[in-house]
Amino acid sequence: MPGRLEHKVAIITGGGSGIGLESATLFAREGAAVLLADINLDAAQKAADAIAKKYPNARALAVKADVGKEADVKAMVDRAVQEWGRLDVMFNNAGIMHPDDDNALNTEERVWDLTMQINLKGVWWGCKYAILAMRQNPTDAAKGLTVGGSIINTASFVALMGAATPQLAYTASKGAVLAMSRELAMVHAKEGIRVNSICPGPLKTPLLMNFLNTAEKRDRRLVHLPMGRFGEAIEVAQGALFLASSESSYMTGQDFKVEGGLTAAYVTPL
Ligand code: NAD
């Protein structure tokens, strides 16, 4: 059985942890060459080594990149194309949740700016350089390779619903990711470049669990989750794999929700 991403080349930002790590492992299992980009090179390298150990034929490469810096994003895309000759999947997944992010009155401008720099500008630049690379993709019909590709941008359920436990900059940045992705999907639809957002629900990853560091904080959220549990990073990675593969070939401009039914909920089961 050929893998679902056989012969394809993927970049995953934030590949050293959480959703990025699980996605990189899954994409590699499905045959993609995977470039794991992370501001934490040690974490990305550990992830790439673990992938190589698990799947000896896998092509996994770790690079240091701060997605909040345009030059780093360009260099990361250039590196993937240099190594493997093309770019089929760009997963703009890296993001931060700043500990001082709060409501309109208490959030400092530096927190707002840093959050936008990484969560929004980082995604914009990832899209920009991916589009430029995907336009140049050589076609190889025998391998099922075409010009164009799939861009996946990580937003969040908070882009779709309000929370009385505010993180204003984070929420605004994720709402902007949805709007930007939709527009890019329209602009590039006829070039064979698909752009979808993925909206994870609250997950058991360091990003959220470092923040929800007391039972009281966790319980405040758990009551709203229909399944009564936080999600796992792998459950979002499975969604990302679908968006990355040609199984989703007629999907673009979508807010793809992987949130355990959270955004459909009014009253949740006892
Ligand atoms: P995580 O903290 O486990 O992993 C994030 C990774 O991104 C880390 O390896 C980190 O080093 C890297 N990173 C941080 N800043 C970076 C930068 N400037 N440049 C490059 N890499 C950087 O987080 P996660 O839970 O896997 O989150 C991944 C994405 O999913 C984020 O965009 C996050 O906002 C989004 N998300 C997470 C949840 C959740 O509950 N965990 C819910 C909705 C959306």
Image (cartoon, rainbow, N blue to C red):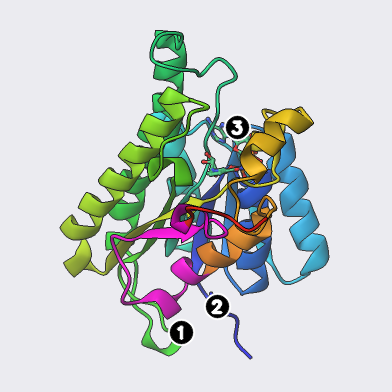
The amino acid type found where label 3 is placed reads Ile
- On screen, residue 31 versus residue 256, left or right, reads right
Q: Position of residue 207 (x, y in %)?
A: 64, 35
Q: Position of residue 249 (x, y in %)?
A: 35, 76
Q: Residue at x 53, y 53 (%)?
A: 267
Q: Residue at x 44, y 10 (%)?
A: 110
Q: Position of residue 76 (x, y in %)?
A: 48, 43
Q: Quadrant of residue 169?
A: top left
The amino acid type found where label 2 is placed reads Glu
Q: Residue at x 64, y 91 (%)?
A: 1
The stretch drawn in magenta includes residue 115? no
Identify the magenta region. Answer: 242-264
Q: Secondary structure at mark 3?
A: loop
Tell me whether circle 3 and circle 2 mark residues in contact (CB < 8 Å): no
Mark 3 Cβ inside 8 Å of ligand 1 = yes
Q: Position of residue 228 (x, y in %)?
A: 68, 54
On the image, numbered disc 2 is attached to which residue?
A: 6
On the image, numbered disc 3 is attached to which residue?
A: 39
| Number of other residues with Cα within 10 Å of mark 3, as a class: few under 14, some 14 to 19, many 20 or more | some
